[in-house]
Amino acid sequence: MNAQIRILLADDHALVRRTLRRCLEAEADFTVVADVCNADEAVAQARQLKPDIVLLDVDMPGMVCFDAARLIMADNPATRVVFLSAFFHDRYIDQALAVGASGYITKTEPPEVLVQAIRAVVDGAVYYSPEVRSRIVIDTQGARLGGVMQSRGGRLTPRELQVLQYIARGLSKKEIADRLHLSERTVNCHTASMMAKLDIHDRVDLARYAIREGLVEP
């Protein structure tokens, strides 16, 4: 018998989770060790269960999924993270590549493609859906977003981008500081720097900008 591939599934839509779980557990060599509804739970369960694969929805309540991916892989480098999403904005793809994800699969893919992708990732390969693959370059240095993002957001640092995503989710400065293990003063500094770079001067407009640029979904 083939070794079981242990999978943790994270998606905030219960129907999607149930459908995906049913699809995955139809494979004799797949075991879904847990399914959860947000990234915070994904981190906690991955830490405890140490799955082979974490399928992580891109847009869920709570922790930003890319932060969750970093924590999951830091806790257990053998765990591979594959992002699932209905969206494939350049910003999402860029962040997925930056955290070292093993795949980015759009939810328009048929179930058999997801199954094949999981097996490929477990064998050490990567998988990107065609819509994603068309936007990236894969060479001897790895995978990166092709071309240069033209928006003002291209000037933001990775940390500023994290802070912006949490602002767009409505978190207070204290909540952002706690989430990112920073001081509130540091969050204020990142916010001020973003406002200067983007020529945006209040948090509401920052949130609108983040949604417009596809950094979070409305």
Image (spheres, grey):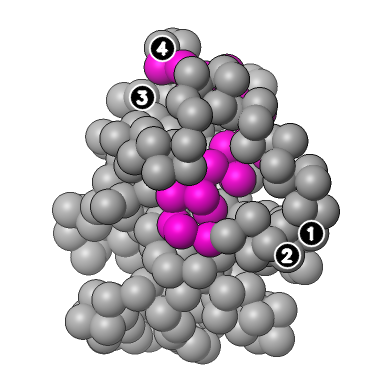
Residue 19 vs 123, above or below: the answer is below
- Indicate the amino acid at tag 3: Arg
Identify the residue at image location x=63%, y=73%.
43
- Indicate the amino acid at tag 2: Asp
- Indicate the amino acid at tag 1: His
As measured in the structure, the alpha-carbon distance from the residue carrying label 1 to the one carrying label 4 is 31 Å
Residue 205, image x and y in percent? 39, 36
Residue 202, image x and y in percent? 48, 36
Task: Please name the residue that numbered disc 4 is placed on.
Answer: 150
Residue 174, image x and y in percent? 68, 62
The answer to which image quadrant residue 128 occupies is top left
Identify the residue at image location x=46%, y=74%.
38
Q: Secondary structure at mark 4?
A: loop
Task: Please name the residue that numbered disc 2 is placed on.
Answer: 178
Mark 3 against mark 4, which lies toward the viewer? 4
Q: Which residues are magenta?
A: 151-171
Q: Which mark is residue 135?
A: 3
As measured in the structure, the alpha-carbon distance from the residue carrying label 2 to the one carrying label 1 is 5 Å
Q: Secondary structure at mark 2?
A: helix
Tag 1 or tag 3, which sits nearer the N-term?
Answer: 3
- Please tell me whether residue 115 belongs to the stretch shown in magenta: no
Task: Please name the residue that numbered disc 1 is placed on.
Answer: 181
